[in-house]
Image (cartoon, grey):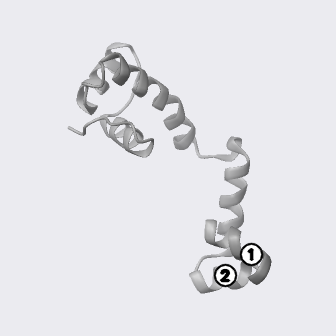
Amino acid sequence: MSFIDAHREDLGIEPICRELAIAPSSYREHAARLADPARRSARARRDDDMREHIKRVHENSFGLYGARKVWHQLRREGISIAKCTVVRTAEQYSTTVAAG
């Protein structure tokens, strides 16, 4: 994505995409989703919402809770979330929640 953005003025989108073996429409769709958050997938939007809950529980535990305890605490609070979602979201946003 960043390579195409950096070189598209000089080389054009189609030749770069051809060399990278991706469809130009895929690049354009990805760029449009980055520009307009409303076009993001439902999973990405939900992960953003859950990230705040995960960070809050993790910080309230003084950074001691791992993914399993964060997951249990969220369930106790009535927030429906899968444990693998806690792990993935924490890893994605660099929140140090130990997997397990």
Residue ID at (57%, 82%): 21
Residue ID at (42%, 21%): 56
Q: Is residue 1 visible?
A: no
The N terminus lies in quadrant = bottom right
Q: Residue 72: which disc?
A: none
What amino acid is labelled 2 in the image? Ile
Residue 75, picture quadrant:
top left
Disc 2 marks which residue? 16
Identify the secondary structure beneath mark 2. Answer: helix
Other residues around mark 1 within 10 Å, as few (<14) / some (14–19) / many (≥20):
some
- Badge 1 or badge 2: first in the primary sequence: 1
Judged from this view, the residue extending furthest toward the top is 77
Task: Please provide percent x and percent y for residue 45.
Answer: 57, 38
Disc 1 marks which residue? 8
Asked if the residue under mark 2 is in contact with the one under mark 1, i.e. CB atoms within 8 Å, the reply is yes
Residue 34 vs 8, above or below: the answer is: above
Identify the secondary structure beneath mark 1. Answer: helix
Residue 37, picture quadrant:
top right
Task: Please provide percent x and percent y for residue 40.
Answer: 63, 46
Residue ID at (24%, 39%): 99
What amino acid is labelled 1 in the image? Arg
Q: Is residue 41 left or right of residue 6?
A: left
Nearer-the-camera pick, 39 or 58: 58
Q: Is residue 94 left or right of residue 3?
A: left
Task: Please provide percent x and percent y for residue 39.
Answer: 69, 46
